[in-house]
Image (cartoon, rainbow, N blue to C red):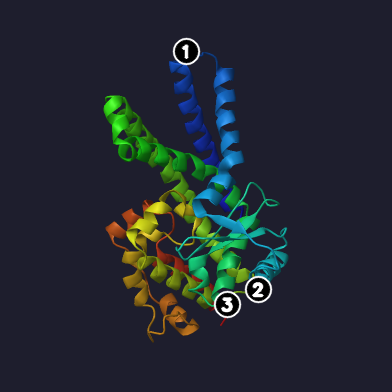
Amino acid sequence: MFSLRLRMFILMAIFCSIIYAIAAVAMYYLHIRGFLPQVLLAFGVMLFQYLIGPKMVEMSMRVKYVSKEEAPWLFEMVEDLARKANIPMPRVGIAYINVPNAFAFGRSLKDGRICVTRGIMDLLDKDELRAVLGHEITHLKSRDVVFITFLSVIPLVLYYVFYSFTFYNPSRRRDSGGSAALIGVAAFVFYFITNLLVLYASRIREYFADKGSVSLGNSPSTMATALYKLVYGAAKLPKENLKEIEGVKAFFLNDLSRAQSEISDLAQLDLDRTGTIDPYELRSLSQKRINLSFADKAMEILSTHPNMLKRIKQLSEYNKGQN
């Protein structure tokens, strides 16, 4: 856990440097000089991100929080996992989007929120959903959700600026000459740089969360099956649905944009073609060596999540300890 936090703090330092650089350039063009004003502006931007981050996620995902009376079995499942993890009970919500997944976010451990989508509730059984929720509980316990909530705001805003100035309003481009296009290009460059940092942070935390779910009593094969089904569910989604959540996909359990390429690899693990990965199939994977192509390695660098075969291979190592 210490290794995860250390890497997260290093990423935070890099991100803060980027924010400071942007603030310094902005103040230069505004003819504002001095180190202190630049620092204050940079911290102001970061504080604004911290405050609005959860609200932006809620709006993007169309989250509605539920009480124990409204969703008793879901609430009790989260409550039991939170008790086992020894963390405060998070708020429980349902995201009214078709993408089958779950996510956690918040400003702090006491402000933790765990949400499931309508899509995942129709796809997984209760044991599989419990494994997914254990994964999300671990994100809260390790506090990496605070980092990812903070880090994800700037790419989200920059992607919106890029989309607005480049595609959304053609009349704006005509009226302002080349300035709108210039703003759009600049926004995309900064989106790409900051998003690479978010991608790396998101990848390293997934391994920790998978292991955390197992430590909370969920079997590695159940967690592997849940991941398999989530990839399968995402692969069937129309591309329009994926574009809607492009800026926040780092919050999910798997990289939705890679589902099509991953599903064929994962189908090879399902030896009996039942749509699940049982302990025997997971044990069989643990005895194999995974060789990724250059293209797979390159895709992983640009992904919010680790290569799924590598990830389930890691789960197979935990499966050994249970045999």
What residue did someone put label 3 on?
Answer: 127
Q: Quadrant of residue 259?
A: bottom left
Q: Which mark is residue 73?
A: 2
Q: Which residue is mark 1?
A: 31
Q: Residue at x 44, y 57 (%)?
A: 305
Front residue (pair 274, 157):
157
Q: Secondary structure at mark 3?
A: helix
**What secondary structure is marked by label 2?**
helix
Q: Amino acid at mark 1?
A: His
Q: Is residue 132 visible?
A: yes
**Looking at numbered disc 2 in the image, what kind of residue is underneath it?**
Trp
In the visual, does 229 lie left or right of 80? left
Disc 3 crowd rating (10 Å Cα; few below 14, some 14-19, many 20+) is some
Q: Quarter-wise, where is residue 140 in the image?
A: bottom right
Q: CA distance from mark 1 to mark 3?
A: 59 Å
Q: In which quadrant will I find the C terminus?
A: bottom right
Q: Secondary structure at mark 1?
A: loop
Which residue is at a point 73% across and 58% down the rendered structure image?
Answer: 88
Residue drawn at (54%, 78%) of the image? 125
Structural crowding at the residue carrying mark 2, measured as other residues with C-alpha within 10 Å and reported as few (<14), some (14–19) or many (≥20): few
**x and y percentages locating residue 54 in the rendered image:** 58, 47
Q: Position of residue 13 (x, y in %)?
A: 54, 37
Would you call the spot at circle 1 few (<14 residues within 10 Å), some (14-19), or many (20 or more)? few
Residue 168 in the image, given as x and y percentages of width and height? 34, 40
Amino acid type, label 3: Asp
Q: Nearer the viewer, residue 286 or 219?
A: 219
Is 109 located above or below residue 286 in the figure? above
